[in-house]
Amino acid sequence: DHAAVRKYPSASAGLKLKCLQFPPNFTLVNTDGSMVPTQSTTIYTMRSTNTGAERLALGLLPVKDPTLIRPANINTRPTHKIWSIHDGPTMKEYMSKSFPRLPWDTIIDNDAEWERFAQAKGTTYPQPQYSPGSAVVHPTNPHVGVVLVGDACHAFPPDTGQGINSGLNDVVALDRCLRGQDILTGEPVDEKTESHAAVMTLKDALQRYQANRRPEHHALIRLARFGAPYQYRQSARGDR
């Protein structure tokens, strides 16, 4: 089938993610007991004292604006204990025991955030997948068609950080095809060159788009499978 979705296994597929909202420029406790302010443009990873199936980590990606909230990401298997806690006080107690060095009372000073985090269902990482057919044109009208871009055409765990990038590349490629431009350079196509024939119909534009993006999507899915699926420190035993 032209648009049949092709799915592939990955060690990170099925993991769950949710975020605890840290304030901008929150402080951490240094080894000498002093308080150290964090920087918005710095990546932070904080590992819990938990071991085995209970181990946990908080990951904070950099943000350019120092006034923005810092999402602290948690990635675990769906069987982790954190997904069975549904009230704020119990969640705060669990996180305080798991990360005893964090000054929780100053980082999160309101019960509402603990309650929100405890009740959040989070999201699940999908299997790496894509549709080889990213465009369909009406059989009798070359000016009517449907095109897939971004997550509608391909999806995968965020192991390589290419989700937004690949979606933006789709949009740029489609825009240039519709304008009759070279997909790589954005320059007007040479109407005298057969390989760069002028785009006359929507059908022509969508066929160029699909021919350009299909191999890219296939490569992205392969990269997603083998890029860094164990960066979340999940146990390999769960995949056997």
Image: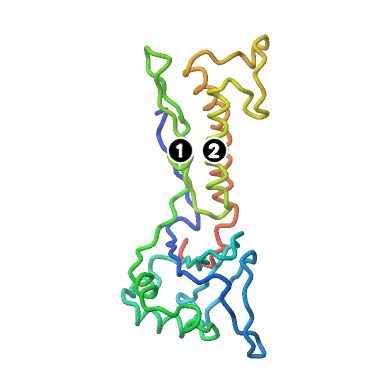
Give 78 or 175, whichever is nearer the viewer. 175
Of the residues shown, which amino acid type is indicated by label 2? Answer: His
Figure check: 118 above or below 3:
below
Give 55 or 185, whichever is nearer the viewer. 185
Disc number for residue 153 = 1
| Rendered location of residue 233, percent (x, y) | 54, 68
* Lower sequence index among marks 2 and 1: 1
Give 228 or 110, whichever is nearer the viewer. 110
Q: Secondary structure at mark 2?
A: helix
Q: Secondary structure at mark 1?
A: loop
Marks 2 and 1, Cα distance to the nearest angstrom?
8 Å
- The colour scheme of the drawn protein is rainbow
Q: Is residue 12 left or right of residue 1?
A: right
| Rendered location of residue 240, percent (x, y) | 47, 61
Contact, CB < 8 Å: mark 2 with mark 1?
yes
Figure check: 114 above or below 126:
below
Q: Is residue 213 left or right of residue 95?
A: right
Point 48% across, 32% down: residue: 132
Of the residues shown, which amino acid type is indicated by label 1? Answer: Cys
Point 45% across, 38% down: residue: 153
| Rendered location of residue 194, percent (x, y) | 64, 11
**Image quadrant where residue 93 sits:** bottom left
| Rendered location of residue 217, percent (x, y) | 54, 38
Q: Residues within 10 Å of mark 2 (few under 14, many from 20)?
A: many
Point 48% across, 68% down: residue: 74
Residue to which mark 2 is pinned = 217
Q: Which quadrant is home to the N terminus?
A: top left
Residue farthest to the top, as pictured: 192
Picture mark count: 2
Q: Residues within 10 Å of mark 1 (few under 14, many from 20)?
A: many
Residue farthest to the bottom, as pictured: 32
